[in-house]
């Protein structure tokens, strides 16, 4: 990885892309420290490690702790993406039609996603502001009123759109997937705070007799992180090779050609989707804390969408499984793959071209997604269970999700760097 980075930085075009990306991420980090007007910036310090705040902080780079203008991060945009992609599955005919129109249809779908992002960001921002302010111990809003809530909602919605725009700028002119890079930058930026929190809890006030317990905890935590990182890296890079043969000899084609499919086809996207999807109802429910906090229906829904509770864990795992299967078929469309193989004059041995190839790829995707969903669910769920069993901080329980995102994005970024370097070598050879 270090060698790849060194070689990439030696190329001016790639170096400019990396520097542009870093510049955008610096702007994003600065934005997380600009507090929303009319807000008590220190009000959330007492609940900074709670489940909902930790989830939203993952998508806002710690911006929610400061209640900054970028406190909502990319969470509304990700939720809007999920909804729009679901609506393309023969639910909204116009969306289905747009999905088949190539680049023109993609632009229309992106526009619809932006409009939905505005609505979701406004609703979530008002919901979470009213919810936190309803907690008697916080006093988040200085002068609560309808006008104040609306103005805060407008500011936070604008911040969410600005964050999404920064992600698009990275994707278009920088390096890597912009939204994923922003999420990863937010997670990495919170590491010093996490280290300080662990030190405070384990060593700051520990007696000499309890010091060894703190050291043991840190050692076990580091070993667990190394094991998870190694496991995630291994699975994320694992491929299933589908053999491909050609009906006619093509330039560059050999008898050993194959089509690689990742064991975890969907990557870390299902984890991001599931986290964002489970956070949205939580933010909306918070707006009703003061009025319905003691009602049975409110307690049931709060338990269902709380990732630290049993119901929330089950829902979170199910969402990861569902989104893994869903996004795998979005990434690898069996129908289009079958059509492309026919156009190239190629086929899979022992499988008839056309419908049979489509069915074969669909069955293969189902099997691969079963392994992928089990892998993602296991890595995300183990830290949550450990957090509940041993009474660890809630933010540590979300560490599996954060590790999945960081490792997945890092691997994808290195893969993209290698692709850019390889492309440059080919261009140089042709010239």
Image (cartoon, rainbow, N blue to C red):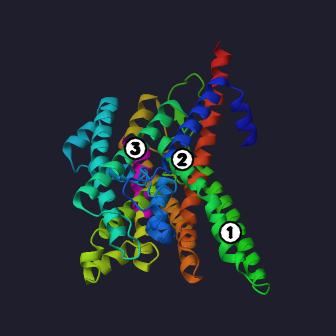
Q: Position of residue 394 (x, y in %)?
A: 53, 73
Going 37% across and 49% down the picture, which residue do you hit? 77
Residues packed near mark 2 inside 10 Å, few (<14), some (14 to 19) or many (20 plus): many
The span from disc 2 to disc 3 (Cα, nearest Å) is 37 Å
Closest to the observer, 23 or 337: 23
Q: Which residue is mark 1?
A: 224
Q: Is residue 391 left or right of residue 93?
A: right
Q: Which residue is mark 2?
A: 29
Q: Sequence-wise, which precedes: disc 2 or disc 3?
A: 2
User: Mark 3: which secondary structure?
Assistant: loop
Mark 3 vs mark 1: in front: 1
The span from disc 3 to disc 1 (Cα, nearest Å) is 36 Å
Mark 2 vs mark 1: in front: 2
Q: Position of residue 234 (x, y in %)?
A: 65, 55
Which segment did they paint magenta?
320-335
Going 41% across and 71% down the picture, which residue do you hit? 138
Q: Which residue is mark 3?
A: 333
User: Mark 2: which secondary structure?
Assistant: helix
Q: What quarter of the picture does the N terminus occupy?
A: top right
Q: Position of residue 428 (x, y in %)?
A: 67, 17
């Amino acid at each position: 990885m270090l060698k790849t980075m060194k070689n990439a930085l030696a190329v001016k075009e790639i170096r400019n892309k990396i520097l542009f990306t870093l510049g955008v991420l610096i702007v994003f980090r600065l934005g997380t420290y600009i507090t929303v007007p009319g807000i008590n910036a220190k009000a959330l310090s007492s609940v900074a490690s709670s489940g909902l705040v930790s989830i939203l902080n993952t998508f806002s780079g710690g911006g929610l702790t400061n209640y900054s203008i970028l406190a909502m991060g990319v969470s509304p945009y990700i939720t809007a993406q999920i909804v729009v992609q679901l609506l393309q599955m023969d639910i909204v005919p116009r969306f289905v039609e747009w999905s088949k129109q190539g680049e023109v249809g993609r632009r229309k779908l992106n526009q619809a996603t932006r409009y939905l992002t505005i609505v979701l960001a406004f609703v979530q921002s008002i919901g979470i502001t009213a919810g936190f302010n309803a907690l008697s111990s916080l006093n988040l809003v200085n002068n609560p009123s309808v006008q104040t809530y609306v103005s805060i909602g407008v500011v936070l919605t604008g911040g969410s759109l600005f964050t999404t725009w920064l992600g698009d700028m990275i994707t278009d002119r920088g390096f890597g997937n912009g939204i994923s890079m922003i999420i990863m930058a937010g997670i990495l930026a919170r590491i010093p705070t996490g280290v300080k929190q662990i030190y405070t809890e384990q060593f700051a006030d520990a007696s000499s007799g309890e010091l060894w317990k703190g050291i043991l905890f840190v050692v076990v935590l580091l070993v667990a992180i190394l094991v998870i990182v190694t496991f995630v890296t291994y699975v994320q890079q694992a491929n299933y090779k589908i053999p491909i043969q050609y009906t006619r000899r093509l330039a560059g084609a050999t008898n050993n050609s194959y089509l690689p499919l990742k064991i975890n086809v969907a990557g870390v996207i299902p984890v991001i989707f599931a986290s964002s999807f489970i956070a949205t109802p939580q933010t909306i429910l918070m707006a009703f804390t003061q009025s319905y906090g003691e009602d049975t229906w409110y307690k049931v829904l709060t338990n269902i969408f709380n990732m630290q509770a049993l119901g929330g864990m089950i829902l979170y795992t199910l969402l990861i499984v569902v989104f893994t299967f869903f996004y795998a078929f979005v990434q690898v469309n069996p129908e289009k793959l079958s059509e492309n193989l026919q156009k190239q004059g190629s086929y899979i041995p022992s499988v008839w071209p056309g419908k049979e190839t489509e069915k074969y790829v669909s069955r293969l995707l189902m099997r691969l997604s079963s392994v992928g969903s089990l892998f993602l669910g296991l890595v995300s769920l183990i830290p949550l269970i450990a957090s509940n069993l041993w009474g660890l901080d809630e933010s540590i329980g979300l560490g599996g999700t954060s590790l999945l995102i960081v490792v997945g994005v890092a691997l994808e970024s290195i893969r993209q760097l290698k692709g850019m370097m390889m492309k440059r070598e080919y261009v140089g050879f042709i010239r």
